[in-house]
Amino acid sequence: MATDVTTTAVDKMNCLLQGELSALETYRQALEKVEDPRAKDVLMQCHMCHSRRVDAIVEKIVSLAGKPAENSGAWGSFAKLLEGGATVFGDKAAISMLEEGEDKGLADYRKLASDPDLYVRELAADLISKQEGTHEKMRNLKLLVK
């Protein structure tokens, strides 16, 4: 059975996991809607990167005898917002929304990189550079797509 400290760490990791699951949903929806082939390539790269982060977070939670979140929870509403926005406003709007999601994710990783819990800090430190990478890809893509 997990200790209170471990349970708190797992809760924080599950928050990250829910954000990553939401990112997967959002990128999947964007890939269905976005028409620009250059954008689709970048979106696929980001989707795969978020998928690898999901795997890493789940692995860490399980190693602490925790139960990984199974869905995006409140984060899922962001994916639903994108679904409607991409259809109505086009590629540029979808990419802007994805960048906003990347902003939020980066803020979450940065916050947890200085968390008092060693397990949480280590996980955030292991994954923050990947989050910075997808954030930068979306920022650059937003400038590229008309």
Image (spheres, grey):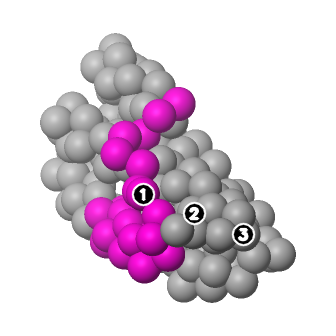
Percent x, y for residue 47? 29, 58
Marks 2 and 1 sit apart, C-alpha to C-alpha, by 8 Å
Q: Is residue 20 above or below residue 122?
A: above
Q: What residue did someone put label 3 on?
A: 5
Q: Nearer the viewer, residue 123 or 34?
A: 123
Mark 2 = which residue? 10
Residue 21 higher or lower than 121, as above or below: above
> Does 130 appear above or below 33?
below
Identified by mark 1, the residue type is: Lys
Residue 116 percent coordinates (x, y): 82, 75
Along the line of sight, which residue is nearer the eye, 76 or 86? 76
Give the Cα separation between the discs numbered 1 and 3: 15 Å
Mark 1 and mark 3 lie on one chain; the one further toward the N terminus is 3
Residue drawn at the location 53% of the way across and 30% of the way down? 74
Q: Quadrant of residue 107?
A: bottom right
Question: Which of the marked residues, 2 or 1, is nearer the chain's N terminus?
Answer: 2
Residue 137 picture quarter: bottom left
Q: Where is residue 128 in the image (x, y as percent from the top left)?
A: 58, 76
* Residue 68 part of the magenta-drawn span: yes
Rendered residue at 58%/43% (across/down): 100
Task: Identify the residue position indicated by label 1 in the image.
Answer: 67
2 or 3: mark nearer the eye:
3
Magenta span dominant secondary structure: helix
- Name the residue located 54 percent from the left edge and 45 percent from the top edge: 101
CA neighbours of label 1 inside 10 A, class few (<14), some (14 to 19), many (20+): some
- Per the rendered image, the range of residues in magenta is 50-74
Of the two numbered discs 2 and 3 on the same chain, state the one appearing first in sequence: 3
Quadrant into which the C terminus falls = top left
